[in-house]
Amino acid sequence: MEETFTLCVVRVKRKKPFFITFYPFATMKTNFLKLAGFFALMFGSVMLFTQCHTDVNGMGPEDFQGNLQRGNGRGRGAQNGQQAGTPGGQEEKGLSKEAVCTCLTANFPAEALSEAEKESLLFMAEEEKLARDVYLELFAKWQSPAFSNIAGSEQRHMNAIACLLSKYQVEDPAGNNAAGVFKNETLQKLYAKLLADGSVSLEAAFTVGATIEDLDISDLLKASEEADNQDIKAVYAELTKGSRNHLRAFTRNLGNLEASYTPQYLSKELFDEILSQDQERGGSICGTCSNGQGSNGKGAGGGNCNNGTGAGKGNNGKGRGRG
């Protein structure tokens, strides 16, 4: 009779242990297949657990790094006015134009509009439209997702400017104008030039994208310095943040083609500083946190979305909470 020995491989709580019996001098092929089958079973179990973890959350652990931070701030009134603030990191794409307009009106005062502020709003309305129109055309030609994704963001920028123009009862120059049509003659000429330049090659198209964002950031910074209305400065700051992200995206795409971009409007120092920073999260305008209502009280649900603060007001008291 052949000598045999038994190895206890694993014991789970109080269940019976799982054994594998080895026959050192018998059929080596059979023993090898048993051992291989065991390890395949263990590996499959680990993979199944990992997959289940991913499916339950809708994303893997690494995806959480790219997910927006959320504040979940709560405000409590003196009596029954408990109100849960909306998530603190709502991205700009989560709100409709109507919601943005409503919140800009509700959460910011209607201050006197200076001539400089009026002119900057009129110009930025069409400059954001220029960016959107050029990107849509370049996407149609080159089919790069960078252009379609950023074009969608530019539409939301247009919406924010349109809300401010509506709030201050100024006619929107972009209005329902067709793509590539501008009231501002300078922007009309620039559109034609950028579209022609971007049609030469994919590298040239990414360079055009970087140029537009370079110009946009420069113009937004200047316009913000001349503005003092709270809502205008808040919108300009948010648009500038988005444009910085767009500039990073286009320069990365150029880098993938072993090309680079030299700033034409921003200083080299500011340009390098922007590229050295990580992507920024959107949604810091109070208007991107929608208002909420508790069981017996109302809350602004506003505050600074970046750190998740929110304000709540109860029947007979006020409260602030930080998420």
Image (tube, rainbow, N blue to C red):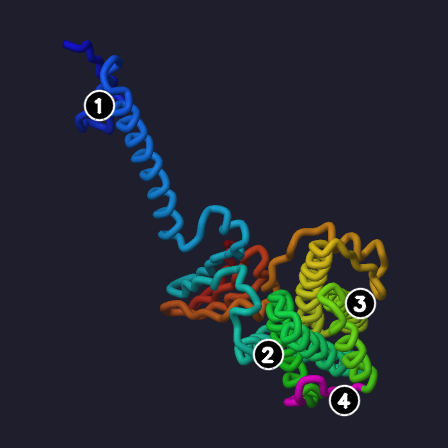
**Tag on residue 183?**
4
Front-lying residue, 306 or 149 = 149
Q: Which residues are magenta?
A: 175-184
Q: Is residue 53 above or below residue 186?
A: above
Q: Quadrant of residue 31?
A: top left
Q: Is residue 178 magenta?
A: yes
Q: Residue at x 46, y 64 (%)?
A: 317
From the top left corner, tell me how far across and down residue 176 is, in percent.
64, 89
Between tags 1 and 2, which lies in front?
A: 1
* Dot 4 amino acid type: Lys
Most common SS among magenta residues: loop
* Dot 2 amino acid type: Thr
Q: Residues within 10 Å of mark 3 (few under 14, many from 20)?
A: some
Q: What separation in Å lies between label 1 and label 2 (alpha carbons)?
A: 71 Å
Residue position marked by numbered label 2 in the rendering: 105
Q: Secondary structure at mark 1?
A: strand
**Tag on residue 168?**
none
Q: Is residue 251 above or below residue 135?
A: above
The answer to whether residue 51 of the structure is visible from this angle is: yes
Residue position marked by numbered label 3 in the rendering: 218
From the top left corner, tell me how far across and down residue 52 is, in percent.
34, 47
Q: What separation in Å lies between label 3 and label 1 (alpha carbons)?
A: 71 Å
Q: Earlier in the sequence, mark 1 or mark 4?
A: 1
In the rendered structure, are the residues bearing label 3 and label 1 in contact, judged by CB atoms less than 8 Å apart?
Answer: no
